[in-house]
Image (tube, rainbow, N blue to C red):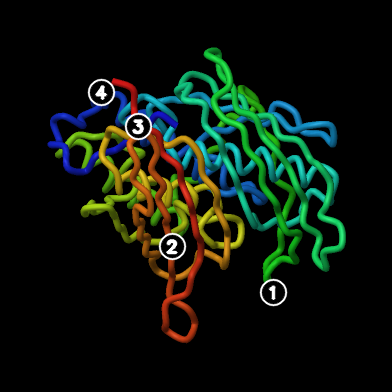
């Protein structure tokens, strides 16, 4: 993916064209996502992105999203977290299409190969189900995805998803398959927000204030990471919350992947672009915060490889591995 956020660049150089009208529209989109999220079965992240379920069936699943200001990174592309949510839901939707619509799925592995075509305009993700792994004690579905826009193929990918029971005391609902133009935001009676909704809006307002004061893009501060670069490495700490949570309160799998990938990108200079990734989901992304650490394990003339680890605090108080990611990067052509 032809993207890079360089935290070392001055704010003026990173400033995006978020004027006051655009910032107001982004805040409206936050409120729209909150209102839509009151229908159970989905999560705030998908509602905020405004994903469109264009087709859902056992033959294939098709989702699309418009790369608009609320989810656009500094380079004009869909943010890495937004892109990862798109492919995650397209592939999970393909598995869930043949199951009970309420089924809970947990991402186990994911692999993505980027072509270098920028993730701009309207992105179409087509997911396909390829059955369950034979001989496994748990039901683990295998699916693939292809993401395209008007410029061509942006990405190919594959993933596996484990069928799980809902956590104790949690009732799951079918994922609403809203299509573009068919999902007007419902009114929030009296404009009164619930505690979790207030938390989402508070994070959004802090991000909007940051953009006003220092420039940059909204999504970088709302869903992004402020990774600290060091020679051959990068690290970041991400606060958990309902703005990045899934249906059971854990960090949504696509956002987790996007945050880790952004940190991996920050471990290298802007001369490198992300070309492929392989991810392993090890334990739930829960707790007050997650720690992300990236290390360059190979730095050649044309290809670099970065290993990224995400940890959280376990119930015993110690660090627990949540997620591991290997990324490949290509040196940009001059």
* Mark positioned earlier in the residue sequence (1 or 4): 4
Instruction: Kindly report the distance in space between the C-alpha atoms of the residues bearing marks 4 and 2.
Output: 32 Å
Residue with the mark numbered 3:
331
Name the image quarter holding residue 129: top right
* Mark positioned earlier in the residue sequence (4 or 3): 4
Q: Is residue 206 left or right of residue 169?
A: left
* Percent of width and height locating residue 221: 30, 44
Q: Is residue 267 left or right of residue 111?
A: left
Name the image quarter holding residue 156: top right
Q: Nearer the viewer, mark 4 or mark 2?
A: 2
Residue with the mark numbered 2:
310
Q: Which residue occupies 37% across, 34% down?
A: 302
Q: Which element carries disc 1, helix, strand or loop? A: loop
* Depth order, front residue of 272/199: 272
Q: Looking at the image, is 222 positioned above or below residue 246?
A: above
Instruction: Kindly report the distance in space between the C-alpha atoms of the residues bearing marks 1 and 2.
Output: 26 Å
Instruction: Kindly report the distance in space between the C-alpha atoms of the residues bearing marks 4 and 3.
Output: 28 Å
Q: Is residue 188 visible?
A: no
Q: Is residue 211 visible?
A: yes
Q: Which element carries disc 4, helix, strand or loop? A: loop
Determine crowd level at label 4: few under 14, some 14-19, many 20+ residues with C-alpha closer than 10 A: few
Determine crowd level at label 1: few under 14, some 14-19, many 20+ residues with C-alpha closer than 10 A: few
Residue with the mark numbered 4:
17
* Depth order, front residue of 229/334: 334
Q: Nearer the viewer, mark 4 or mark 3?
A: 3
Q: Nearer the viewer, mark 1 or mark 2?
A: 2
Q: Nearer the viewer, mark 1 or mark 3?
A: 3
Residue with the mark numbered 1:
168
Q: Which residue occupies 49% across, 45% down?
A: 34
Q: Nearer the viewer, mark 1 or mark 4?
A: 4
């Amino acid at each position: 993916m032809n993207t890079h956020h360089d935290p070392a660049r001055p704010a003026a150089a990173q400033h995006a064209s978020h004027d006051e009208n655009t910032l107001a529209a982004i805040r409206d989109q936050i409120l729209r996502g909150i209102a839509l999220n009151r229908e159970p079965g989905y999560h705030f992240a998908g509602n905020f992105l405004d994903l469109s379920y264009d087709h859902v069936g056992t033959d294939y699943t098709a989702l699309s999203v418009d790369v608009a200001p609320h989810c656009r990174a500094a380079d004009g592309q869909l943010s890495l977290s937004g892109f990862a949510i798109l492919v995650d839901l397209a592939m999970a939707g393909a598995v869930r299409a043949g199951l009970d619509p309420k089924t809970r799925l947990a991402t186990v592995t994911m692999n993505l190969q980027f072509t270098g075509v920028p993730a701009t305009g309207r992105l179409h993700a087509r997911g396909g189900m390829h059955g369950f792994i034979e001989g496994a004690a748990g039901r683990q579905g295998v699916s693939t995805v292809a993401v395209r826009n008007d410029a061509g193929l942006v990405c190919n990918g594959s993933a596996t998803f484990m069928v799980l029971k809902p956590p104790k005391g949690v009732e799951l609902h079918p994922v609403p398959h809203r299509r573009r133009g068919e999902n007007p935001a419902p009114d929030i009676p009296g404009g009164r927000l619930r505690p979790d909704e207030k938390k989402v809006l508070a994070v959004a307002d802090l991000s909007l204030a940051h953009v006003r004061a220092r420039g940059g893009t909204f999504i970088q501060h709302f869903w992004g990471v402020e990774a600290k670069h060091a020679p051959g490495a990068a690290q970041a700490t991400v606060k958990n919350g309902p703005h990045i949570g899934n249906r059971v309160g854990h960090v949504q799998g696509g956002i987790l992947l996007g945050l880790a990938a952004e940190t991996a990108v920050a471990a290298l200079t802007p001369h490198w672009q992300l070309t492929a990734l392989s991810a392993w989901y090890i334990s739930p992304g829960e707790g007050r915060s997650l720690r992300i650490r990236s290390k360059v394990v190979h730095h050649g003339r044309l290809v670099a490889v970065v290993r990224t680890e995400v940890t959280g605090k376990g119930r015993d108080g110690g660090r627990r591995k949540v997620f591991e990611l290997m990324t490949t990067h290509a040196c940009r052509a001059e």
